[in-house]
Image: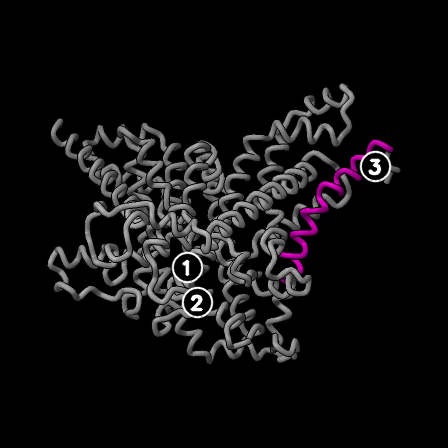
Amino acid sequence: MKPKKSLGRVMMYVILVAYAAVTLYPFLWMVAASFKPLREIVGGNMSLFSENMSFENYRTIFGHTSLFPRWFLNSLMVATVGTVINVFINSMAGYSLSRLRYPGRDKIYHGLLLLMMIPGQVLLIPNYLLLQQFGMLDSYSALILPAAANIANIFLMRQFFINFPRDVEEAAEIDGLSRYGVFFRIAMPLARPTIATTAIFGFMGFWNEFTKPMLYLKTNTKYTLTLGLQSFQSQNAGTMWNQVMAAACISVLPIIIIYLIFNKFFLVGLRMDGEK
Amino acid sequence: MAKPTKRQLQEWKQGYLFITPAVLVIGVFIGIAALFVVYLSFMKVNLFTDTYTFVKLDNYLRLFKDPTARKALTNSLTFSLIVVPSQTVIALVVASVLNGKIKGKYAFRTIYFLPTLTSSSALTLIFMFMFSVTGPINMFLIKMGILPVGEGINFLNNPSFALKVIMIMNIWSTVPQYTTMYLASLQDLPASLYEAASIDGANSFKKFMNVTVPYLKPITTYVLLTGIIGTLQMFDQAYIFSNGSGGPANSTLTVSLMVYRYAFGSNNAMGYASTIAIVLAVVIMAVSFLSEKLNASESLY
């Protein structure tokens, strides 16, 4: 009995380690290549490490003539502003749909439920034309405004506020807070964990978005990181893999940092995603 | 209906005030946009002259005679057919192993999750580098003696390999998401089922096949359908890989990429592109409707 059992366990660890290697391998190459000179990368060297490693590629992409720092700041700005706006619009809407009673509320709720079914892909063309009419093409509003509210997150907030005890609100009102004060000072702070989950995934969504910046932005100084990365690759006749990989490293870094700090929110968010 | 009290009126006011921003944004960019795209699908749109001409069902009929559409559909279906089962099986195995009593569970989970955090543009570039002629994959194959020295395969520009590279990349980047779904559902698997199987003398593999897999059947259906929806919409990876062209030789032209090319490329055929997008959307909505239905009936059970 015993040896059989340990064989199964060995198999388990083999699978786990093998899959971890498959997952990490591309990342390790990205990091290694970002420190190597180009001729060594394209020279077909198999080892991850070499004595020629330096910060040269990073110095180049952060250099005076490089647009990369701008793209980084553009992404940071769009993702931050977009996330903050989302947090307020979604929380307010979720609160309105769960805690407040007014005519037409259920119709709005069902309308949102219906609109959530529409896949985003089909909306790209009409949104492009609408943004063109609004004169918003080639501006950050084109990236932020259409994504300023998110139905799934509104429902998530609604779900939170439905289970929120009414006596807390009543106590706050007795203490002299207005109904708006109750929401901004009591309800929203108490919803922090749910808000954090939506904010993290929202930020990640803005940060990693590729299709919209690609369609809407034309001026290369306005590019976001994802679009900048892609242009890095397509502009240079022979791809400067060393610089592209350094840029890719920097682009992934903020999200990985957020992930390591807020790990538990990621698990919560994914469970909710998975279970719908 | 009774006249609302002052307090009620205040509540109405707050209710409308709080829902208005969301309704405006969603109403315009999803609601109106959806109606607009249906309208466009019956039009011939010329963006340069800004003219819209009503063409009845021409765009829909054109779809049946378009060889590019057939090619894109074939590519997308092949892509789904290979990617969806692969990602599901890998996710199922990884999740089941992770669910066992193992050391370093947390570390493994953290590592496995990394691809989900990476933007499609960063990870596509990493894979393009890995599969380039002098990249690590070719060097590995040469070192193993599978390929002759100095004759690396041009994976990126060879029509018989390009889509396969995108498939590998897509499987690699989507497995974590499905692993997490499986893990969530495995946590509710009653330990008594395993104990019963142990008493019957089942080994780990038999337990996996006879207990875990049947138990996870409902979530597997859901994972499969979600996978179909995801793969049918795949755009970024194919776009970056081919720099928007769908090349080499249309081998990476997916349905979504074709929509882009017709709408924003030199074809200037936004009406027709809208039609393709709508047909794709209807298919996707049918699949998601089915998955919601299955999900609802299974959770009742």
Quarter location, residue B6: top right
| Mark 2 to mark 1 CA distance (whole Å) | 15 Å
Query: In the image, which is nearer the foreground, mark 1 or mark 3?
Result: 1
Q: Which residue is labeled 3 in the image?
A: B9
Residue A12 screen position, x and y as percent: 22, 36
Residue A272 in view of the camera: yes
Q: Chain of mark 3?
A: B
Q: Chain of mark 2?
A: B
Q: Which residues are magenta?
A: B6-34
Residue type at numbered disc 2: Gly
The residue drawn where x is 68% and y is 61% is A134
Which residue sits furthest front? A64
The answer to whether tags 3 and 2 share a subunit is yes
The answer to whether tags 2 and 1 share a subunit is no
Q: Which residue is labeled 2 in the image?
A: B244
Residue type at numbered disc 1: Phe
The residue drawn where x is 13% and y is 56% is B143
